[in-house]
Amino acid sequence: MKAHLGISPIAWWNDDLVELSAEVTLEECLSQARQAGYTGVETGQRFPMDTGTLRPILDAAGVGVCGGWFSGLLLEGDIEAEKDRIAEQLALFQAVGAPCIVYGETASTIQGDRAAPLASRRRLSEEQIRPYARKLTELAEWCAAQGMPLSYHHHMGAPIQTEEELDLLLIHSGDALPLLLDTGHLAFAGGDVLRVIDNHHARINHVHTKDIRQDVVDALDPTKHSFLDAVLRGAFTVPGDGSLDFEVIAKRLGSYGYEGWFVVEAEQDPVPNPPLEMAKVGQRELARVLAAAGYEMV
């Protein structure tokens, strides 16, 4: 089995919390990611969205694009509008050889609102999830037909947050909608990472290896604290610095033959958690656990 190691630039800058943005350029971020041992970086707000500008920057750093967030609005929007909105990113990702577009729902979500406590997020009934799942399936089928798969990102503060909600989404969507397994978001929401792998391994096409600090998560009051409060308090970290057992997770994914990207995505304050040093911690831990699980690093 082959594994690729990638990282998100969210350790260097945060799109929702500008106060957590280290004063580094895109070129410095990519160079440090490569220095830490990663071959791919997911896109973020400082990435140019045209191939002619981006490709020379990637080539100079010796890294590729291993995915990137798309702020979806399908929960309240329509398919044709989403096709128009995603078309530019789809074309760029095709041109630079990205493995997928990360679909994150942002319609009626609170993950970017520091004033909104976690308990205030929108919740969907099964009857509401059904049509949403159908629309996601249709968009995923269209994107795949264009040559670029989607990967659905369950997320804290979003309507699909818990393990139960994720189960319902995958039950009512077609196999054409792949899943991004985010270990940190799932654990934060109280889900069982291994059970989700067991139940939905056939749908997983991308993995975010986000760790959590369980003591920080346990101390949060969902009626008072927002998702961004959790980030500021240090709820997330890189593999090897938190509470999750990534060797067990890697072995479980390997037992089902998962091959592809393992992406470190850990939004943190870059002052007490220097991005380069934390990137190295995450890389070392992933290299260790993936070797133990029988993966060959690409």
Image (cartoon, grey):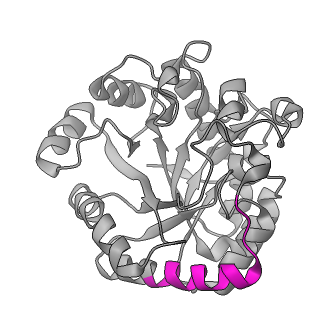
Residue 255 place in picture, x, y as percent: 71, 66
Identify whether 81 is placed above or below 118. below
Residue sitting at x 73%, y 32%: 235
Most foreground residue, 291 or 7: 7
Q: Is residue 83 magenta?
A: no
Q: Is residue 152 found left or right of 70 in the rendered image? A: right
Looking at the rendering, the stretch of residues picked out in magenta corresponds to 122-138
Identify whether 279 is placed above or below 193. above
Residue 106 place in picture, x, y as percent: 52, 57
Q: Is residue 135 magenta?
A: yes
Residue sitting at x 54%, y 73%: 178
Can you name the residue that lies furthest to the left here? 52
Q: Is residue 290 visible?
A: yes
Residue 203 place in picture, x, y as percent: 60, 74
The quarter holding residue 125 reads bottom right
Q: Is the N terminus in the top left, top right, bottom left or bottom right quadrant?
A: bottom right
Most foreground residue, 82 or 214: 82
Q: Is residue 236 visible?
A: no
Most foreground residue, 263 or 129: 129
Can you name the residue that lies furthest to the top here? 271
Residue 111 place in picture, x, y as percent: 61, 46
Residue sitting at x 20%, y 39%: 59
Residue sitting at x 70%, y 61%: 122
Q: Is residue 252 found left or right of 281 in the rendered image? A: right
Q: How many marks?
A: 0
* Majority secondary structure of magenta residues: helix
Most foreground residue, 238 or 13: 13
Identify whether 41 is placed above or below 170. above
Q: Is residue 3 found left or right of 243 in the rendered image? A: left
Identify whether 175 is placed above or below 231. below
